[in-house]
Amino acid sequence: MGAKHSKALATEELKKRVKNNGDQEESLSSAERIRKQTTTRFGYSVLSLAMRGLAEAPQELWELTELQKLNLSLNCLRTLPPTAGALQNLVVLNLWGNQLESLPPEIGQLRNLRVLFAYRNRLSEVPEELSSCTKLEVLSLANNQITGLPSSLANLGSLRKLNLSHNLLSHIPTSVYGMKSLVFLHLACNQLENIADQIQALVNLKILIVEGNCIHSLPRTLCFLSSLELLNVDFNDIQNVPMEMYLLKKLEKLACHPLDKGLHIMHNPLLKPIKEVLEGGLSALYNYLKSV
């Protein structure tokens, strides 16, 4: 009788423990529960809450101030709270594929941020406080509804890669010309009608993509970007090219595949004789321009 009683008590105790553990596991709002999902990769504290169907991030998430890489992509987030600024150790913040209509000014408190992915959202503007993230190296704001950038973003002196493709830009924001470290600038599928002469300030630029816009002509100052290895002006309204274009010596060929380096200039209403000369390749174009 005593053995049976003891066994029953042990079974009941086990059930309680299983239930308590289950309750703890189900408490998704618990900071400790969230912290248990963090991992360490290459020395970084990493947390991924991607593809969780989150309409808002758990409030306790912003208590995990040790986080260095946070992935909130592919959820249903409409806003980020001001408390997001508490994660001041963040190096990478991934927000792509949500429904964000704005970023909080407090994002400027993330002074260690080096990578920010906020593409495929509903952003129409960017807070000027982002300029305080002076360590930022990669910024993707593609596939939003952005019409301009704050002038303060010219302070992003460490930025190397900027993607503003598939937005509503009618001109290249002036602040972009102040980002002197840029090597990659993606502006495809906007509403650009020109490239300003200030483009020559981006002396480190290697890749410039402006395909799918309404650009009528290329400025001669573009030809002073001697580091350019890929220039994509496909699908615009360009009729002629600057005589100085032969100075772009690192554009080694006419390119067709999107990933190929070289000059992409297909699907433009090029005038004679440029159109015919191009049939001989880029070297034929350069020889023609030198002789004019």
Image (cartoon, helix red, strand yellow):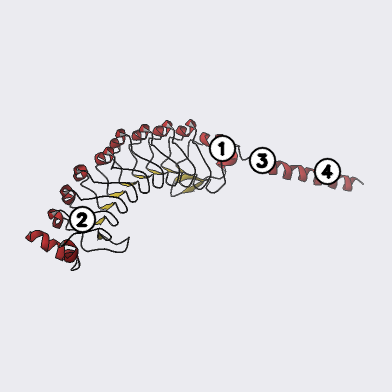
* Side (left or right) of 4 relative to 142: right
Q: Residue furthest right?
A: 1
Residue at the spot x=73%, y=43% of the render?
A: 19
Residue at the spot x=28%, y=50% of the render?
A: 214
* Residue that badge 4 annotates: 9
In front: mark 4 or mark 1?
1
Residue at the spot x=15%, y=55% of the render?
A: 245
* Residue that badge 3 annotates: 24
Q: Are circles 4 and 1 on residues that touch, CB within 8 Å?
A: no
Q: Disc 1 versus disc 3: distance between alpha carbons? A: 16 Å
Q: Of callouts 1 and 2, which one flags the residue occurring earlier in the amino acid sequence?
A: 1
Percent of width and height locating residue 9: 83, 43
* Residue that badge 2 annotates: 239
Q: Disc 1 versus disc 2: distance between alpha carbons? A: 54 Å
Q: Are circles 3 and 4 on residues that touch, CB within 8 Å?
A: no
**Mark 2: which secondary structure?**
loop
Q: Which amino acid does label 4 sit on?
A: Leu
Q: Of callouts 2 and 4, which one flags the residue occurring earlier in the amino acid sequence?
A: 4
Q: Disc 3 versus disc 4: distance between alpha carbons? A: 23 Å
